[in-house]
Image: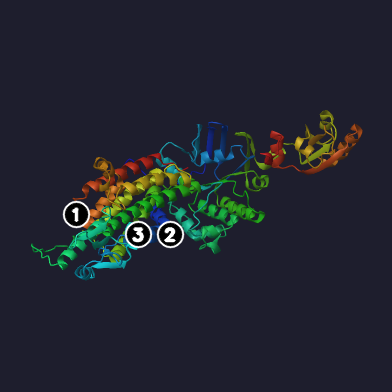
Amino acid sequence: MSSPERPAARAAAVACRALVKRYPDVLAVAGIDLTVDAGECMAVLGPNGAGKTTTVEMIEGLTSPTSGEIAIFDNVWGRSSKGDRTIRSLLGVQLQETHFQEKLTVLETIELFASFYEATRSASDVMALVALESKATARVGKLSGGQRQRLALACALVGRPSLLCLDEPTTGLDPQSRRQVWEIVEAFKAEGGTILLTTHYMEEAERLADRVAIMDHGKIIALDTPAALIASLGAEDIVEVLADRELPLALLCALPGVGNARVEAREAREAEGASSQIAPGGVRVRLSVADIGLTLPALLALAAESGARLDGLVTHRATLEDVFVHHTGRALRDG
Amino acid sequence: MADPMPDKRQPRHHGALATLILARIRMFLREPASIFWVFAFPALLAIALGTAFRDQPPDPARIGVATDGPALTATDLASLRGPSLVLELSPRALLDEKLRKGGIDVIVMPGPTPDSVLYRFDPQRAEARLARFVVDDIIQRGRGRTDVASISEATEMPLGARYIDFLLPGLIAMNLMGSALWGVGYGMVQERSKKLMRRFATTPLTKTAFLLSYVLSRLAFLAVEVAFLVAFGSLVFGVTVQGSVALVFFVALVGVLSFTGFAVLCASRTASVEVVSGFINALTMPMWLASGTFFSYERFPEAIHPIIQALPLTALNDALRAVINDGAGILTIAPQLGVLAGWGLLAFGLGVRLFRWR
């Protein structure tokens, strides 16, 4: 069969090649190659303005790339209107921001979206899936933020998509609503669905994603499984120290158990903030350590020898956030 | 067969279109403000204007006779007390005051010679000139003048010649234009600014089905709108449809299709309610005035009549009036239908071409 009635098991769900999107004032996507395998969940992680949304909107067919090519289950966007319609029938989309008609009910909204597709789930199945059965006859205008987000997911799922594209599905939601969204996404994945989601929450990427693409300034700067990305730091834990004077980098690297060390001048905003009494010239030290039990006593000894006073010391298990910091020198939320 | 898989995945356009139309009808019915503008507003306007300009017998002439100074003869005074006049007996100074303000039409007083009568009135006022002839006729007859010619009158006017008969088709046309432009234009811009259009764009829903849903949902209301206004005019003002009622609906249908074409054009790329409101106002305001909604465009200079007649609202007004007031058939109004269809196709075609989901 030549026509893609159901995607063949081998076909990549998404294959982007040399994708570029240039706006008059900014290069939003600076040439990326990204493949999402059928049945996997790929999270695109990055700060605001990294190009995540532009990338996803090109994959959804909402924005046309300046150059490069996108294939969804072997159908290349823009080849023919029939091919484009085939792609649209395979997609389930939740945009970062959609306001459904407030005068329609939940059931009416879901049935409206169902009418656009050939193969659909029943509205009651979908409402059960997103736990909105009790709201079937409620007007959309009366829903809470979390309920609206679940309605958006219901509309994305009702057309039996093969690929679910979610753009920051949990931004602005309370922790309980966020967990509900995660459970819906996990259920879709358990049925064999493919998911592409953008997020700037590392917990979300770590929980949902099989692989994570870290984006910054329109480029993918790292791409692997969450475990492999964290392992690439060569560290189990991260130690952060605020010291009031310079600590030599060479000595820090030579401490037992340290895989990677980074020393930077303390930023101006800290100096202006609560700790303004601290003398200028202090440093922030970040150590990626394999064995914190070995490193910590040696670090304290080094500080004492150097005559440095420690204003703070924090340790935590290495996360995707640390991977992002390792690659960019910035925190995810810094934007 | 060229295509081995004849469009099995083709979305159910029929289902999508019908469901979208149904959703739009529901949204309309759940919006009290739109119900007001479509039904209550034209009815209130018809009541207000129909009452202000209703046909009524002319007011009787108001005559003043002074109670001081030289008196009229008893014969003349007796004639003036007849039923067709309103007679006011007051001091001369007060009468002059009232004459100046239009409270009375003519002051009747003895003339300079014994048998003569003097009429004092303002010739600039039409009702004063009319009153002068009415009062003269009564005085002359009272003194014994007889008519030399025998007179008979024919005062039945043709049906559909009253102001309300003229007004009602104009109100129907205005309402169809307004509900088509605002209903569709506003609705499209709102769905674009809510980013709902972008969401639709990621589904297999086609642009044509999407735009048609706006046009066709308007048609569902058209029947109700026109039926309501025609029935209202008939029950409240006795406006009767001289021609075929089916043809009235057909003209309305062509008119609505034409104006929804303009609406799609106005809203094809607009994402702000303010901008689309500006477009729609710029389109409708001049036509309300020029196209003969409230008064006939015959009052404008003849030279610009061809321009006025080329406007879609004029064509709709003229076609509706021809059918409702004059009982015209479809061939008589073919030029107006042509103007409407031409504008509609042009605007809709351009709108579809310019249309963007975002």
User: Which residue position is annotated with label 1?
Assistant: B329
Q: Quadrant of residue A20?
A: top right
Q: Nearer the viewer, residue A4 or A173?
A: A173
On residue B97, the disc is: 3
Q: Disc 1 on helix, strand or loop?
A: loop
Q: How far across and how far down the image is residue B299, in percent?
A: 27, 47
Q: How far across and how far down the image is residue B303, in percent?
A: 25, 40
Q: Nearer the viewer, residue A304 or A206?
A: A304
Parent chain of label 3: B
Q: Quadrant of residue B342?
A: top left
User: Which residue position is annotated with label 2?
Assistant: B26
Q: Residue at x 78, y 36 (%)?
A: A286
Q: Are marks 2 and 3 on the same chain?
A: yes
* Amino acid type assigned to the residue bearing label 3 in the image: Glu
Q: How far across and how far down the image is residue A321, in percent?
A: 70, 41
Parent chain of label 2: B
Q: B75 left or right of B92?
A: left
* Amino acid type assigned to the residue bearing label 1 in the image: Gly
User: Of the residues tagged 2 and 3, which is closer to the observer?
Assistant: 3
